[in-house]
Amino acid sequence: MSLPVLRRSVVAISLAAGAALGFGGILIQPETPADPSDYVEFLATAPAAVVGLQLFLVSQLFWAVGLIGVGHLAARRSPVLGLLGALLAGLGAFGHAVTGGARLLQVALAGDGEADAALAAFGASESGVFVPYLLFGLVGTALGLILLSVAIMRSRIAPLWVPITLIAWVVIEFALSGLTPWAPYLALVVGLIGFVALIVAVWRSDLTVWSTEAEARAAGSTGPSMPAEPAGATDAHA
């Protein structure tokens, strides 16, 4: 396997893994109580919530690799939007990973019967030093995906409906999910459609985008050469 093929495959597989783990975590995640004290008890008694949190946390690594790769792909024709979108999307994955780690601490404390400590950890994770990371996760992911979607439109690396679907997912997931009970399910369907289409587009993308200049020159120098003229052709032309 050549290096360009490997790079393209890593990005496509990372997007697939991020989608599978992230959306899988959402599917098995039970409804979360609004009251903090009930939430701590919920963490101690709901194994599906713990598994869903673990899947969400692990998915951030794959999302970071995959979305940064999409930014690289789109940056060939839309360099500014591709770069900014990749940067913000990576920052969003980092913010989610930090807050997900705080949730894991709450899970550990709640599982050990330390309800008061888990409740205090929950309160701390919603304020103070965690606020920037909460914003990174929310704003970075939402704005990063919007910029990447616009870059995809401009670079034409996927059909037009794909970035439109991704923007619709951002709106449903981040603006409507807390307003209507059906929004999370709609976001799941729209997100799966959009990201699967994006994975296919990455998988089918031109290998030259994933090649360095040296690799492209080497590939060009080893391309098919012009056939030599048969003996005597020069004399015939003369």
Image: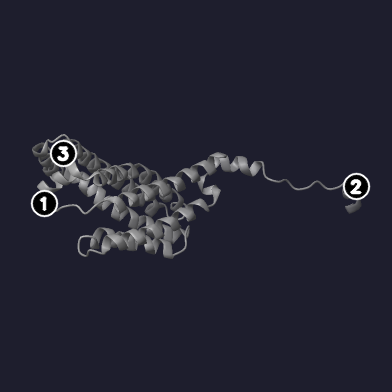
Relative vertical location of residue 108 with respect to residue 171 in this rendering, above or below: above
Q: Nearer the viewer, residue 126 or 69?
A: 126
Q: CA distance from mark 3 to mark 2?
A: 89 Å
Is 203 on the left-hand or right-hand side of 170?
Answer: right
The mark closer to the camera, 1 or 2, is 1
Is residue 227 in view? yes
Mark 3 = which residue?
Answer: 110
Amino acid type indicated by mark 2: Gly
> Left or right of 127: which side holds 145?
right
Give the crowd class for mark 1: few <14, some 14-19, many >=20 residues within 10 Å: few
**Mark 1 element type:** loop
Question: Is 17 or 11 nearer to us in this picture?
Answer: 17
Residue 89, how many percent across, how many down? 33, 49
Instruction: Estimate the spatial distance between the alpha carbons at disc 3 and disc 1, rounded to whole Å.
Output: 15 Å
Residue kind at label 1, given as amino acid type: Asp
Nearest the camera: 79 or 74? 74
Which of marks 2 and 1 precedes in the sequence? 1
Q: Position of residue 101 (x, y in %)?
A: 24, 39
Residue highlighted by disc 1: 35
Q: Which is more N-terminal, label 1 or label 3? A: 1
Q: Position of residue 1 (x, y in %)?
A: 57, 39
Tell me the SS state at disc 2.
loop
Secondary structure under tag 3 reads helix
**Residue 224, numbered label:** none
Q: Is residue 174 left or right of residue 161?
A: left
The residue lying at 90 percent from left, 47 percent from top is: 232
